[in-house]
Image (cartoon, rainbow, N blue to C red):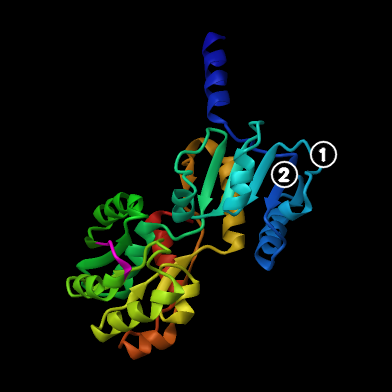
Amino acid sequence: MKFYCRLLLVWMGLLSLPSIADTVLVVIPAETPLTMEFTSELKRQRTDDKVLLHSMADGQLPEANPNLIITMGISALEWRLDQADRTPTIATYVSRSGLDSAELSALPPHVRAVLANPKPERQLRLAELLIPRLRGAGVLHSKVHAQQIPEWIEAAVATDVELKVAELADSEDLARILVSVLDRSDVLIGVDDPVIYNADNLKTILLSSYTRNRVLIGPSAPFIAAGSLSTTFSSPDDIARHVGLMTNQPASMLQVDYPRYFSVLSNQQVARSMGFAPPDDSALAAELARREGIR
Protein backbone atom coordinates (compact mmCIF):
# COMPACT_ATOMS: atom_id res chain seq x y z
CA MET A 1 0.00 0.00 0.00
CA LYS A 2 2.83 2.42 0.84
CA PHE A 3 4.36 1.71 -2.56
CA TYR A 4 1.18 2.65 -4.38
CA CYS A 5 0.81 5.80 -2.30
CA ARG A 6 4.33 6.88 -3.22
CA LEU A 7 3.67 6.08 -6.87
CA LEU A 8 0.51 8.17 -6.81
CA LEU A 9 2.38 11.12 -5.30
CA VAL A 10 5.07 10.88 -7.98
CA TRP A 11 2.51 10.97 -10.77
CA MET A 12 0.71 13.89 -9.18
CA GLY A 13 4.00 15.80 -9.10
CA LEU A 14 4.73 15.07 -12.73
CA LEU A 15 1.36 16.08 -14.07
CA SER A 16 1.75 19.85 -13.95
CA LEU A 17 -0.83 20.28 -16.72
CA PRO A 18 -4.23 18.58 -16.88
CA SER A 19 -4.61 15.71 -19.31
CA ILE A 20 -8.16 16.83 -19.98
CA ALA A 21 -9.18 20.48 -19.63
CA ASP A 22 -12.92 20.92 -19.20
CA THR A 23 -12.64 24.65 -19.91
CA VAL A 24 -9.83 26.12 -22.02
CA LEU A 25 -9.44 29.88 -22.25
CA VAL A 26 -7.51 31.18 -25.28
CA VAL A 27 -6.25 34.74 -24.78
CA ILE A 28 -5.33 36.65 -27.95
CA PRO A 29 -4.20 40.24 -28.58
CA ALA A 30 -6.85 40.68 -31.30
CA GLU A 31 -8.81 38.62 -33.80
CA THR A 32 -6.77 37.83 -36.92
CA PRO A 33 -6.91 35.02 -39.51
CA LEU A 34 -4.04 33.31 -37.67
CA THR A 35 -5.69 33.42 -34.24
CA MET A 36 -8.98 32.21 -35.73
CA GLU A 37 -7.28 29.32 -37.55
CA PHE A 38 -5.45 28.25 -34.40
CA THR A 39 -8.57 28.44 -32.25
CA SER A 40 -10.65 26.54 -34.80
CA GLU A 41 -8.11 23.71 -34.91
CA LEU A 42 -7.94 23.65 -31.12
CA LYS A 43 -11.74 23.31 -30.92
CA ARG A 44 -11.66 20.55 -33.54
CA GLN A 45 -9.16 18.61 -31.46
CA ARG A 46 -10.86 19.20 -28.11
CA THR A 47 -14.45 18.42 -28.97
CA ASP A 48 -15.20 17.28 -25.41
CA ASP A 49 -13.97 20.53 -23.89
CA LYS A 50 -15.32 24.05 -23.74
CA VAL A 51 -12.89 26.31 -25.62
CA LEU A 52 -13.45 30.01 -24.96
CA LEU A 53 -11.80 32.87 -26.85
CA HIS A 54 -10.92 36.18 -25.21
CA SER A 55 -9.46 39.15 -27.06
CA MET A 56 -7.40 41.50 -24.91
CA ALA A 57 -9.01 44.34 -26.83
CA ASP A 58 -12.35 43.40 -25.22
CA GLY A 59 -11.17 44.23 -21.72
CA GLN A 60 -12.60 42.21 -18.83
CA LEU A 61 -12.18 38.43 -18.87
CA PRO A 62 -15.23 36.17 -19.05
CA GLU A 63 -16.24 34.37 -15.85
CA ALA A 64 -14.80 31.10 -17.11
CA ASN A 65 -12.78 29.58 -14.24
CA PRO A 66 -10.66 27.68 -16.79
CA ASN A 67 -8.62 24.55 -16.16
CA LEU A 68 -6.10 25.67 -18.78
CA ILE A 69 -5.14 29.04 -20.27
CA ILE A 70 -3.51 29.35 -23.69
CA THR A 71 -1.99 32.67 -24.71
CA MET A 72 -1.06 33.79 -28.22
CA GLY A 73 1.77 36.27 -28.68
CA ILE A 74 4.16 38.00 -26.31
CA SER A 75 1.70 40.67 -25.13
CA ALA A 76 -0.83 38.02 -24.06
CA LEU A 77 1.93 36.13 -22.23
CA GLU A 78 3.02 39.31 -20.42
CA TRP A 79 -0.59 39.93 -19.44
CA ARG A 80 -0.87 36.38 -18.12
CA LEU A 81 2.30 36.70 -16.04
CA ASP A 82 0.76 39.73 -14.30
CA GLN A 83 -2.11 37.57 -13.01
CA ALA A 84 -1.88 36.19 -9.48
CA ASP A 85 -3.46 32.78 -10.01
CA ARG A 86 -1.41 29.75 -11.01
CA THR A 87 -3.76 28.14 -13.51
CA PRO A 88 -1.66 25.98 -15.87
CA THR A 89 -0.79 28.07 -18.93
CA ILE A 90 0.68 27.37 -22.36
CA ALA A 91 2.14 30.34 -24.22
CA THR A 92 2.08 30.05 -28.02
CA TYR A 93 3.37 32.25 -30.85
CA VAL A 94 6.31 33.52 -28.87
CA SER A 95 9.87 33.38 -30.17
CA ARG A 96 13.28 33.13 -28.55
CA SER A 97 14.01 36.71 -29.57
CA GLY A 98 10.67 37.86 -28.16
CA LEU A 99 11.29 36.15 -24.83
CA ASP A 100 14.80 37.62 -24.70
CA SER A 101 13.59 41.13 -25.50
CA ALA A 102 10.84 40.93 -22.87
CA GLU A 103 13.31 39.43 -20.36
CA LEU A 104 11.16 36.32 -20.04
CA SER A 105 13.86 33.68 -20.42
CA ALA A 106 12.81 32.20 -17.04
CA LEU A 107 9.11 31.36 -16.80
CA PRO A 108 7.27 30.37 -13.60
CA PRO A 109 6.57 26.63 -13.14
CA HIS A 110 2.90 26.85 -14.10
CA VAL A 111 3.70 28.41 -17.51
CA ARG A 112 5.05 26.52 -20.50
CA ALA A 113 5.81 27.85 -23.96
CA VAL A 114 5.83 26.45 -27.47
CA LEU A 115 8.05 28.57 -29.71
CA ALA A 116 7.03 29.83 -33.13
CA ASN A 117 10.49 29.95 -34.71
CA PRO A 118 12.10 26.87 -36.31
CA LYS A 119 14.06 24.37 -34.26
CA PRO A 120 17.83 24.92 -34.79
CA GLU A 121 18.71 21.24 -35.20
CA ARG A 122 15.89 20.85 -37.73
CA GLN A 123 17.16 23.82 -39.75
CA LEU A 124 20.68 22.41 -39.86
CA ARG A 125 19.41 19.00 -40.95
CA LEU A 126 17.40 20.69 -43.70
CA ALA A 127 20.57 22.41 -44.90
CA GLU A 128 22.33 19.02 -44.93
CA LEU A 129 19.59 17.53 -47.10
CA LEU A 130 19.65 20.42 -49.56
CA ILE A 131 23.40 20.91 -49.82
CA PRO A 132 25.49 17.78 -50.47
CA ARG A 133 28.77 17.54 -48.58
CA LEU A 134 27.80 20.41 -46.29
CA ARG A 135 30.67 21.24 -43.97
CA GLY A 136 30.37 24.77 -42.60
CA ALA A 137 27.21 26.75 -41.89
CA GLY A 138 27.41 30.50 -41.37
CA VAL A 139 25.53 32.11 -38.49
CA LEU A 140 25.39 35.86 -38.05
CA HIS A 141 23.87 37.34 -34.90
CA SER A 142 23.61 40.62 -33.04
CA LYS A 143 24.82 41.21 -29.50
CA VAL A 144 21.20 41.64 -28.39
CA HIS A 145 20.36 38.03 -29.23
CA ALA A 146 23.66 36.32 -28.49
CA GLN A 147 21.88 34.18 -25.87
CA GLN A 148 20.61 31.95 -28.67
CA ILE A 149 24.04 30.93 -29.95
CA PRO A 150 24.79 28.18 -27.38
CA GLU A 151 21.62 26.41 -28.53
CA TRP A 152 22.81 26.61 -32.15
CA ILE A 153 26.22 25.28 -31.17
CA GLU A 154 24.54 22.36 -29.40
CA ALA A 155 22.45 21.70 -32.53
CA ALA A 156 25.59 21.81 -34.69
CA VAL A 157 27.24 19.18 -32.50
CA ALA A 158 24.16 16.96 -32.80
CA THR A 159 24.17 17.25 -36.61
CA ASP A 160 27.96 17.23 -37.06
CA VAL A 161 27.87 20.58 -38.87
CA GLU A 162 30.61 23.13 -38.16
CA LEU A 163 29.25 26.57 -37.35
CA LYS A 164 31.01 29.72 -38.52
CA VAL A 165 29.65 32.23 -36.02
CA ALA A 166 30.11 36.01 -36.21
CA GLU A 167 28.63 38.82 -34.16
CA LEU A 168 27.48 42.04 -35.78
CA ALA A 169 28.42 44.81 -33.36
CA ASP A 170 27.61 47.72 -35.69
CA SER A 171 24.84 47.67 -38.31
CA GLU A 172 27.10 49.67 -40.64
CA ASP A 173 29.41 46.65 -40.81
CA LEU A 174 26.71 44.25 -42.03
CA ALA A 175 28.06 43.80 -45.57
CA ARG A 176 31.66 43.32 -44.44
CA ILE A 177 30.90 40.86 -41.61
CA LEU A 178 28.45 38.98 -43.79
CA VAL A 179 31.01 38.49 -46.55
CA SER A 180 33.56 37.16 -44.06
CA VAL A 181 31.03 34.59 -42.81
CA LEU A 182 29.94 33.58 -46.32
CA ASP A 183 33.50 33.06 -47.49
CA ARG A 184 34.02 30.53 -44.68
CA SER A 185 30.70 28.72 -45.09
CA ASP A 186 28.70 26.57 -47.51
CA VAL A 187 25.35 28.06 -46.48
CA LEU A 188 23.96 30.94 -44.42
CA ILE A 189 21.56 29.95 -41.65
CA GLY A 190 19.13 32.69 -40.68
CA VAL A 191 18.59 32.75 -36.91
CA ASP A 192 15.77 34.34 -34.93
CA ASP A 193 17.43 37.75 -34.75
CA PRO A 194 15.22 40.64 -35.94
CA VAL A 195 18.09 43.09 -35.46
CA ILE A 196 19.72 41.47 -38.52
CA TYR A 197 16.92 39.69 -40.36
CA ASN A 198 14.54 42.50 -41.19
CA ALA A 199 13.21 44.27 -44.28
CA ASP A 200 15.96 46.90 -44.25
CA ASN A 201 18.78 44.33 -44.33
CA LEU A 202 17.22 41.65 -46.49
CA LYS A 203 18.47 42.95 -49.85
CA THR A 204 22.06 43.17 -48.60
CA ILE A 205 21.88 39.68 -47.10
CA LEU A 206 20.45 38.02 -50.20
CA LEU A 207 22.65 39.81 -52.74
CA SER A 208 25.80 39.11 -50.74
CA SER A 209 24.83 35.47 -50.38
CA TYR A 210 23.92 34.79 -53.98
CA THR A 211 26.91 36.70 -55.35
CA ARG A 212 29.07 34.14 -53.54
CA ASN A 213 26.88 31.23 -54.64
CA ARG A 214 25.51 30.71 -51.15
CA VAL A 215 21.89 30.25 -50.16
CA LEU A 216 19.93 31.36 -47.11
CA ILE A 217 18.08 28.78 -45.01
CA GLY A 218 15.39 30.37 -42.83
CA PRO A 219 14.86 32.25 -40.66
CA SER A 220 11.08 31.88 -41.15
CA ALA A 221 8.39 31.18 -43.73
CA PRO A 222 7.82 34.86 -44.74
CA PHE A 223 11.45 35.03 -45.92
CA ILE A 224 10.84 32.35 -48.56
CA ALA A 225 8.93 34.66 -50.89
CA ALA A 226 11.63 37.29 -50.38
CA GLY A 227 14.41 34.98 -51.58
CA SER A 228 15.40 32.46 -48.92
CA LEU A 229 15.85 28.96 -50.35
CA SER A 230 14.02 26.90 -47.75
CA THR A 231 12.92 26.62 -44.13
CA THR A 232 10.90 24.51 -41.75
CA PHE A 233 7.81 26.07 -40.21
CA SER A 234 4.82 25.12 -38.08
CA SER A 235 1.29 26.06 -39.14
CA PRO A 236 -1.50 26.99 -36.68
CA ASP A 237 -2.72 23.39 -37.03
CA ASP A 238 0.78 22.14 -36.11
CA ILE A 239 0.92 24.41 -33.06
CA ALA A 240 -2.53 23.29 -31.92
CA ARG A 241 -1.47 19.63 -32.24
CA HIS A 242 1.64 20.32 -30.17
CA VAL A 243 -0.45 22.02 -27.49
CA GLY A 244 -2.51 18.83 -27.32
CA LEU A 245 0.69 16.86 -26.84
CA MET A 246 1.78 19.18 -24.02
CA THR A 247 -1.46 18.61 -22.12
CA ASN A 248 -1.54 14.84 -22.69
CA GLN A 249 2.16 14.17 -22.01
CA PRO A 250 3.25 16.98 -19.66
CA ALA A 251 5.97 15.05 -17.88
CA SER A 252 7.90 14.39 -21.10
CA MET A 253 7.78 17.94 -22.46
CA LEU A 254 10.27 20.75 -21.90
CA GLN A 255 9.06 23.97 -20.31
CA VAL A 256 10.11 25.91 -23.43
CA ASP A 257 10.17 23.84 -26.59
CA TYR A 258 9.76 23.91 -30.35
CA PRO A 259 6.73 22.46 -32.13
CA ARG A 260 6.98 18.75 -32.79
CA TYR A 261 4.92 19.03 -35.97
CA PHE A 262 6.10 21.01 -39.01
CA SER A 263 6.31 21.37 -42.78
CA VAL A 264 9.01 22.47 -45.21
CA LEU A 265 8.60 25.43 -47.54
CA SER A 266 11.04 26.16 -50.37
CA ASN A 267 11.43 28.78 -53.09
CA GLN A 268 11.51 26.82 -56.35
CA GLN A 269 12.65 29.82 -58.39
CA VAL A 270 15.63 30.43 -56.12
CA ALA A 271 16.50 26.73 -56.32
CA ARG A 272 16.53 26.80 -60.13
CA SER A 273 18.54 30.02 -60.35
CA MET A 274 21.15 28.64 -57.93
CA GLY A 275 21.43 25.31 -59.75
CA PHE A 276 19.62 23.18 -57.18
CA ALA A 277 17.22 20.39 -58.06
CA PRO A 278 13.65 21.53 -57.31
CA PRO A 279 13.14 20.73 -53.61
CA ASP A 280 10.39 18.25 -52.82
CA ASP A 281 9.04 19.84 -49.65
CA SER A 282 6.88 16.88 -48.63
CA ALA A 283 9.78 14.45 -49.04
CA LEU A 284 12.12 16.76 -47.12
CA ALA A 285 9.62 17.08 -44.24
CA ALA A 286 9.13 13.31 -44.15
CA GLU A 287 12.88 12.68 -44.00
CA LEU A 288 13.40 15.26 -41.28
CA ALA A 289 10.56 13.73 -39.25
CA ARG A 290 12.12 10.28 -39.73
CA ARG A 291 15.48 11.53 -38.44
CA GLU A 292 13.78 13.06 -35.40
CA GLY A 293 11.79 9.89 -34.74
CA ILE A 294 8.46 11.64 -35.32
CA ARG A 295 5.52 9.57 -36.57
Q: Position of residue 207 (x, y in %)?
A: 32, 84
Q: Which residue position holds label 1? A: 63
The type of residue carrying mark 1 is Glu
Q: Secondary structure at mark 2?
A: strand
Which label sits in the foreground, 1 or 2? Answer: 1
- Please tell me which residue is depicted at 56% across the width and 44% down the height of the picture: 246
Report the front residue among 208 and 36.
208
Q: Position of residue 226 (x, y in %)?
A: 45, 81
Single out the residue that lies furthest toward the top: 2
Q: Position of residue 174 (x, y in %)?
A: 29, 72
Q: Position of residue 37 (x, y in %)?
A: 68, 63
Single out the residue that lies furthest toward the left: 184
- The question of residue 62 being in magenta is answered with no
- Please tell me which residue is depicted at 49% across the width and 65% down the height of the picture: 233
Residue 228, visible in the rendered structure: no
Magenta span covers which residues? 167-171
